[in-house]
Image (tube, grey):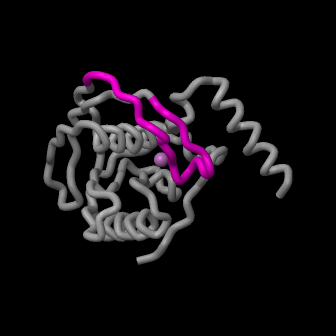
């Protein structure tokens, strides 16, 4: 397994649409293992394949973050079937949006359909933290970052900070 480089904003690849996984072969299994290693190394709450340079519909996350025992979840081709209610995700962050967090409006609960890494279909009904993680990671598969869901004023502040940082490099 190896730790992969995580692409960061404003890398245009993060905006690419992803393709469904049709054949769960050895390359896909290796990518999932490398994604897990990358996520736990960072550490991050979740990771989408597009963030490490693969335009595939794959997301991973740990359903018990902060616990010593790892609880890795792998979803291929996930789709939100239903979303209900509204909550504020406090201080949401992203490995692809370094040094920045913000409150984000999210659905309070989601029903997600996906297949696991063995190819078996499964559905998950998530609320609260888990619902937020799922929405955040599935957004990545559609080229959406959490900064797209905050006020334009806050977003512009972040953008100008990044531009300044890039100029200083
Ligand atoms: Ni993210």
Magenta stretch encompasses residue 102: yes
On the image, the x and y values in percent for residue 71 come to 25, 63
On the image, the x and y values in percent for residue 2 come to 46, 76
Q: Nearer the viewer, residue 125 or 141?
A: 125
Q: Nearer the viewer, residue 163 or 54?
A: 163
**165 above or below 118?**
above
Horizontal side, residue 49 vs residue 29: left or right? right
Q: Magenta stretch: give its range.
A: 84-104
**Which quadrant of the structure image shows residue 136?**
top left
**Which quadrant of the structure image shows residue 90?**
top left
Residue drawn where x is 15% and y is 46% of the image: 122
On the image, the x and y values in percent for residue 152 come to 63, 24
**40 above or below 168?**
below
Residue drawn where x is 36% and y is 44% of the image: 133
**134 above or below 70?**
above
Horizontal side, residue 107 vs residue 152: left or right? left
Horizontal side, residue 114 vs residue 66: left or right? left
Q: Main secondary structure of the magenta part?
A: strand
Tell which residue pokes out farthest to the right in this image. Answer: 168
Residue drawn where x is 33% and y is 23% of the image: 86
- The N terminus appears in which quarter of the rendering? bottom left
């Amino acid at each position: 397994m190896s730790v992969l480089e995580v692409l960061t904003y404003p890398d245009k690849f993060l905006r690419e649409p992803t393709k469904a996984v049709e054949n769960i072969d050895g390359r896909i299994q290796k990518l999932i293992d490398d994604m897990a290693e990358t996520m736990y190394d960072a550490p991050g709450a979740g990771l989408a394949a597009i963030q490490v340079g693969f335009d595939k519909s794959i997301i991973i996350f740990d359903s018990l973050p902060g616990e010593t025992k790892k609880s890795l979840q792998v979803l291929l081709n996930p789709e939100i079937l239903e979303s209900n209610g509204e909550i504020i995700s406090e201080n949401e962050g992203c490995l692809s949006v370094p040094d920045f967090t913000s409150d984000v409006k999210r659905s309070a609960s989601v029903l997600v359909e996906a297949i696991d890494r063995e190819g078996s279909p499964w559905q998950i009904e998530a609320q609260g933290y888990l619902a937020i993680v799922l929405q955040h990671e599935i957004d990545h598969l559609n080229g959406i970052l959490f900064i797209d869901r905050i006020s334009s004023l806050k977003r512009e502040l972040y953008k100008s900070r990044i531009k300044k940082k890039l100029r200083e490099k």
